Structures are given as structure tokens and as C-alpha cells.
């Protein structure tokens, strides 16, 4: 679901990160508040004051989302679900889990606590706003009033029964508990989420064509995100359920193409990359000992005029948890490593010996066949 991420800080054992999409949306929020929302509701303030209010309001929203996502993570931890951290991305954030919740009850508790937290924040900010009418300056109280409003909107929006919003997860937990079938419950709730996303896209286009360009842009972007996230969430569940328990050994190629450390970069490019079309090759010495691997990314760092002279030995990447895996490891672990590193191939090793290569396309081929067969069984 995520692109490039930036680590911000660690709190209570949880890593807090932002996806690069958040930077775009933060700028858009700040601009919308500074030139639209605050000038409309609070007249005759200076342009500088509006921009300070806009930046402060955006930061307040940022912190509110962190609190919302922390509530999910804390409840998940109480139910024994491992949490990798929290990532803020376009239109919100997500508490990252390594697996699905262990039960419908755990899913319900983890999902509902987010909107309840936002409701509590909205009530708290609104109380301060009412008291601040007599004691606080207009700009300060204006930002507090906005935070009360936006947390209320976050709570209401997240309660919509459209997966993967919190309300959609609540719906999934109810369906899961009723039929005892997580995949079916996810398919129904994600279908509703995808449909709701399409509705928001159409609404955004209508708003934009009617002259409300900013409002239309917001609805369009939210709809695009929601529709994409709903489809991806179901695909991730199907992938996990099919690949879980499958050892890497089942997918790996036991006769991988390898290269010698003494091979020049030019020979590697012309005789291996252009011939086999792989982005990564294991590097093995004359004693069949694995030295590391060479990737197209490594090659790009070498000036083209040096390709004929420089050998692979000088630029080889050493073996690490990012490019190797055990043949007995779970296939989902391999897929998670590929997603994290952006690699499409991993070396399968036993000690310092190369025993195979596992490629993303091979796992996806089996996944596609299994999905097709299971759907055929369901139809019959």
C-alpha cells in the first residue's frame, strides 16, 4: 500500500513514519485552511495570521491522526497482534499489522476504538473552544474549533461501513462472527468500500464541474484512495491465506544462473542481463561459495566508461536479510521482504551455500492458479 516512507520517531515501542503522499496532502490541507476555511469563518485577520492558523491546524490534524492510530495499535497489542508501527499517508494513517486479527472480537475492538478516540478528541477540543470564547484570542480559539470539527468529521467518516475504513472493519467483524468466514466477510466489506469510493469519485467530478473545484478535488482524491485501498486489502488477504504455510522451497528455482566475482560489468550486462532479463544475479566463487549478489541498481552506480575494466567483485552487494532467505521460511516472509526492499528475486541459502532463487513472478503464478481453482470450486 505504501511508497517511500520517512521515519519520524518511536513512541511506546511503535515506529511512526510518513508516506511521501502525506507531504502532498499536508501542503494541500494547509493551503485549504489558510485561503479558504479560516478566512471564510474568521473575517478581517491578516494574511500572515491565516497562514499561521493553517499550519497550526494541519499540525493539529497530524497529531490527532497519530493519536487515532495509536489507539488501534494499543488495543491490537492487548489482543496479541504484532504491530510494526504507524504510517501516515494520504488521507489518514494505518496501524501496520503483520497478520489478520485472531478473531472477530479482536477485529471489532481494534476497529471501533479509533472512531471513539476521535469522538473523545472532538469533545475535548469543543469544550476548550467553548471556554476559550471568553479567554483566548480569535486565531487560537479558531484553530481549536477547527480541531473539534475535523476530529468529529474523522470519527463520522471512519464509521462509514466501507472497508478498509474503521466502520468497514466493524462490518467485517460482524460478518466474520456471523458466518465464521474471514475471506467472505472481507470480500463483502471491501466490495462496499470499493463502491463507496466510486461514488465519491463521481461526486467529486460533479462538484468540480459545478464550480466547487477544491471540494470536488478532495472528494475525487478520497474516492480514488478508498477504492484502491479496498481492492488492495482484499487482494492482500487472499495472498496471505494462500501463501501462508507454503515453504520457500516450493517456489524456488534450484538451478539459478550465477556469475563469477571476476566477471566484468560489461560482460555481465551484455551476456547475462540482456540474455536472461534478470535484475539480480547471485555471485558465486570458484569454490561454489556464495559471495553476494549484483543488481541493476549496483550497476547504475558505475560510470559506463568503467564497465569494461571494473569487475563484479568491486561492486558486489554482500548477503543480508534483505536479499537472502531460508528454503524453510514461509513464502509470506519472502513476499514481505520483496515488498519492503522493492526486490523481485531473493537468494535462497543454507549457510554460505546458494541452493536456489525465489522470484516474485513464480509466487504470483501459483497464486493466480490457486485463486482461479478456488473460484471455480465456489461457482460449482
Image: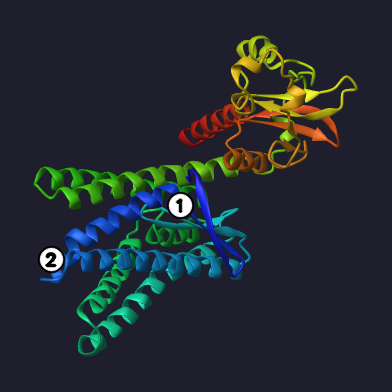
The dot on residue 252 is none
Where residue 140 sits in the image (x, y, percent)?
A: 26, 77
Does residue 55 appear left or right of residue 256 in this picture? left
The correct choice, above or below, for 101 with respect to 293 in the image is below
Q: CA distance from mark 1 to mark 2?
A: 44 Å
The residue depicted at 26 percent of the width and 88 percent of the height is: 131
Q: Is residue 336 visible?
A: yes
- For numbered disc 1, what is the local secondary structure? helix
Q: Residues within 10 Å of mark 1 (few under 14, many from 20)?
A: many
Between 80 and 337, the one lying in front of the other is: 337
The number of numbered badges drawn on the structure is 2
* Residue 280 to residue 318: above or below: above
* Outermost residue, left side: 210
Judged from the image, the secondary structure of the residue bearing numbered disc 2 is helix
Q: For mark 2, does the 10 Å Cα neighbourhood hold few (<14), some (14 to 19), or many (20 or more) residues?
A: few
Per the image, the residue denoted by label 1 is: 185
Instruction: Depth check: give the residue in front, 193 or 379.
Output: 193
In percent of width and height, residue 99 lies at 59, 53
Residue annotated with mark 2 = 40
Q: Residue furthest right?
A: 287
Residue 181 visible in the picture? no
Q: Nearer the viewer, residue 190 or 210?
A: 210
Q: Which numbered disc flags the more N-terminal residue, 1 or 2? A: 2
The x and y percentages for residue 139 are 23, 75
Residue 203 in picture, x, y percent from top left:
19, 47
Identify the image quadrant of residue 116.
bottom left
Q: Is residue 242 left or right of residue 372?
A: right
Amino acid at each position: 500500500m505504501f511508497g517511500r516512507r520517512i521515519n519520524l520517531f518511536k513512541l511506546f515501542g511503535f515506529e511512526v513514519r510518513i508516506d511521501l503522499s502525506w507531504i502532498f496532502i499536508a501542503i494541500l490541507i494547509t493551503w485549504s485552511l489558510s485561503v479558504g476555511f479560516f478566512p471564510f469563518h474568521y473575517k478581517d485577520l491578516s494574511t500572515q495570521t491565516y497562514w499561521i492558523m493553517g499550519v497550526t491546524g494541519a499540525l493539529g490534524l497530524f497529531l490527532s491522526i497519530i493519536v487515532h492510530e495509536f489507539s488501534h495499535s494499543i488495543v491490537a497489542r492487548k489482543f496479541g497482534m504484532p504491530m510494526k508501527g504507524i504510517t501516515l499517508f494520504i488521507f489518514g494513517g494505518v496501524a501496520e499489522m503483520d497478520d489478520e486479527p485472531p478473531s472477530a472480537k479482536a477485529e471489532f475492538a481494534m476497529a471501533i476504538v479509533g472512531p471513539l478516540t476521535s469522538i473523545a478528541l472532538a469533545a475535548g477540543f469543543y469544550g476548550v473552544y467553548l471556554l476559550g470564547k471568553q479567554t483566548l484570542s480569535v486565531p487560537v480559539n479558531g484553530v481549536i474549533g477547527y480541531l473539534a470539527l475535523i476530529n468529529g468529521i474523522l470519527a463520522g467518516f471512519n464509521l462509514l461501513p466501507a472497508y478498509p475504513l474503521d466502520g468497514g472493519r466493524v462490518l467485517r467483524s460482524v460478518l466474520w462472527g456471523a458466518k465464521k468466514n474471514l475471506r467472505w466477510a472481507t470480500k463483502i466489506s471491501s466490495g462496499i468500500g470499493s463502491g463507496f469510493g466510486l461514488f465519491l469519485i463521481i461526486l467529486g467530478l460533479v462538484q468540480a464541474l459545478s464550480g466547487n473545484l477544491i471540494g470536488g478535488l478532495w472528494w475525487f482524491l478520497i474516492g480514488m484512495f478508498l477504492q484502491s485501498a479496498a481492492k488492495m486489502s482484499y487482494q492482500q488477504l487472499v495472498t496471505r491465506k494462500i501463501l501462508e504455510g507454503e515453504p520457500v522451497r516450493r517456489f524456488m528455482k534450484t538451478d539459478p544462473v550465477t556469475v563469477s566475482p571476476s566477471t566484468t560489468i560489461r560482460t555481465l550486462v551484455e551476456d547475462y542481463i540482456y540474455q536472461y532479463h534478470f535484475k539480480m544475479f547471485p555471485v558465486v566463487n570458484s569454490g561454489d561459495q556464495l559471495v553476494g549478489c549484483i543488481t541493476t541498481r549496483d550497476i547504475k552506480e558505475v560510470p559506463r566508461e568503467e564497465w569494461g575494466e571494473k569487475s563484479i567483485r568491486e561492486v558486489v552487494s554482500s548477503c543480508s536479510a534483505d536479499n537472502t532467505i531460508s528454503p524453510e521460511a514461509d513464502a509470506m516472509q519472502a513476499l514481505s521482504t520483496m515488498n519492503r526492499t522493492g526486490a523481485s528475486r531473493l537468494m535462497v541459502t543454507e549457510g554460505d551455500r546458494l541452493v536456489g532463487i525465489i522470484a516474485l513472478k513464480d509466487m504470483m503464478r501459483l497464486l493466480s492458479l490457486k485463486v482461479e481453482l478456488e473460484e471455480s470450486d465456489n461457482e460449482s
